[in-house]
Amino acid sequence: CPPSRGRCCPRPSPATTSRPGRAARPGPGGCPKPPPATYSSFVLPSITVVTWNVGTAMPPNDVTSLLHLNTGETNDADMIAIGLQEVNSKINKRLKDALFTDQWSELFMDVLSPFHFILVSTVRMQGVILLVFAKYYHLPFLQDIQTDCTRTGLGGYWGNKGGVSVRLSIFGHMVCFVNCHLPAHLEKTEQRKEDFATILHLQQFEGRAASGILDHDLVFWFGDLNFRIESLDIRFVKYAIDNNILSQLWEKDQLNIAKSSWPVLSGFQEGPLNFPPTFKFDVGTNKYDSSAKKRKPAWTDRILWKIKSPSAGLGVGGRRPSRGVLLVSQLCYCSHMEYTISDHKPVAAIFAVQFPSKADKPPVEIFVADEWSRPEQAVVRYKMAAGFHRSSWDWIGLYRVGFRHPKDYVSYVWARSDDGERCLEMQQVMFSEEVLPKGKGEYILGYYSNTSSSIAGVTEPFQISLPRSEEGSSPTDSSGSSSEEEDDSTLVLLAPKSRSPSPGKMKRHRSRSPSLAKFQGLILRPSSRDRGTSRSPSPQSRRGHPGDIPAIHLPHEELGCRGAKPKEPGLAANSPEGSSFYQTVREPGGPRRVSADNPLARADPRNLGLLPALRLELIDQALGRRRESGDQGHPCRRMSPTSPLGCTTPKEGSSP
């Protein structure tokens, strides 16, 4: 952070910590290599917290500087929590976001995935969004992930104001992130106090470790808290800003006053406000409000933290703790004036969190070979720690390096369901050849725990070098395609409490967001466009279904008719020189033959690649088409209650 925007301190040396014990790889003779060094008695993760009221604006092109990326190895964060307020939540926008990931979440995942950050959890309440990311090798040590939200707008019936939270266990310590949007205006101080107290009271989590927000070992409270500057005239406030005498404004800041007088804020701490007030600006500029209202500048966007134990030493400068004491040191607290899409400026803070580690081994250790060059090498061995709560719905996912969230896998296999003491022994599963990616690339294996809804074990990156099949292999449909093509695929982001790798088995989140399931008489169908780099969590969605759209078939026995020269080289072997050919078109009324010159034969949507992302059909029409297809001799397929029409029953490596 430049001195004019905030205060930064040098990061502690990374030599004070090492990565946790992750996956061991088999050495010569199949014996596993010893795992890498585990954390010492103290872990020192760096946590970046960002808050931004985006004012219903579209995402900018780049947020690298906001997230403090590309700043050198000593400034790399281990976790990033991002709180947004006033994200566009109009009904048409919310309907789209209910089907697909919202644009802001997509942006942050796109920016952070190349830096090996994985989306751990997310929660949304209308325009208030909270996203928590972590480096992939920390995932096994992030457990007991839960989310909650509290509406305080219109007496608790509207979610334009309120708070959302993500709580989780980090190396055995309970941490809670709370993103709030409190009431606006200078005179609403007491209302802000009551709303925050309501959020603290209503948000409750499962488990005995930390049921309430303040029961957690560490709480980060941030957002558009809307506290203003009292008493001072707007001309004096602007004079103090222009002359960089911000300390004269601190004592009149409502939040600074409240921290010493409100019991609900007891123990919350904040770094010095060495950056200009972040509200209110003319959109597209760095000039404070020039409208007729001329609102007084204020530090509305804030980041605070609180330690559960009052005896723990906390401070912005920090000091070396004694054994067993948690310490938080704020390394940076600044605003980012370069972002002008909103009337608020984003605020970021970087924390070094130091506490004794309660977990130095992952719940599941995975052992894998250094390279898979043959299908028979796709063997995965894993061992569960004592006390690990396994489930018959646990699975092991194969991820491409740079994956974005736990359901962003290439393929997966179900974990073995052995009970009793046998589950503590070394287990083994194998990926079938059909589900393995072809070509060369770096991949990671992760054990997904259904009980904790998180990844309980990961490997280090390893190579897969399998030959591509001769049929249909091309740079565009192979697993080794470019990341640019992957980013164009449709992402299905599962709900925070989903218990299954299949989107069809998602559980509903507590949010009252619109859902297409409420529209009776409609069926949602994925497009039949087959893309090898699809990011859909369900492998079944990569296969087209017969009867989805009018299809054009080219039977070899019908190609040999007199007339024109064939246009495709592949047809020359089956058609005499100088002959024309016909195509069979399947329609609801039955198949019929059309000439190649017919526009219907040339305008095949499968070849043009112009299929829509979604199709809405009446149930009666879809079922009628299914029955007509069955009458024409197409075999019927078994369907699961949650699968689209025509989905086959799951096989190994496919979506259940």
Image: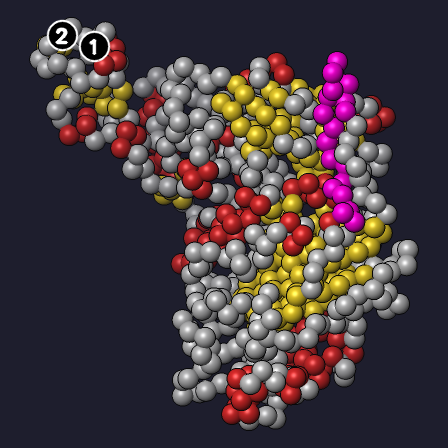
Please report the residue visible at 75 percent of the width from the left and 72 percent of the height from the top.
268
Q: Position of residue 364 (x, y in %)?
A: 76, 33
Q: Position of residue 26 (x, y in %)?
A: 73, 21
- Quick check: can you spot residue 420? yes
Is 614 or 430 nearer to us in this picture? 430
In the depicted structure, whether residue 291 falls above or below residue 309: below
Disc 2 to disc 1: CB gap under 8 Å = yes
- Quick check: can you spot residue 198? no
> 10 Å neighbourhood of mark 1: few (<14), some, or many (≥20)?
some
**Amino acid type, callout 2:** Glu
Please report the residue visible at 64 percent of the width from the left and 76 percent of the height from the top.
273
Chain-order first, disc 2 or disc 1: 1
Q: Which residues are magenta?
A: 15-33
Q: How many marks?
A: 2
Tell whether position 29 is magenta: yes
In the depicted structure, whether residue 63 falls above or below residue 525: below
Q: Position of residue 10 (x, y in %)?
A: 69, 60
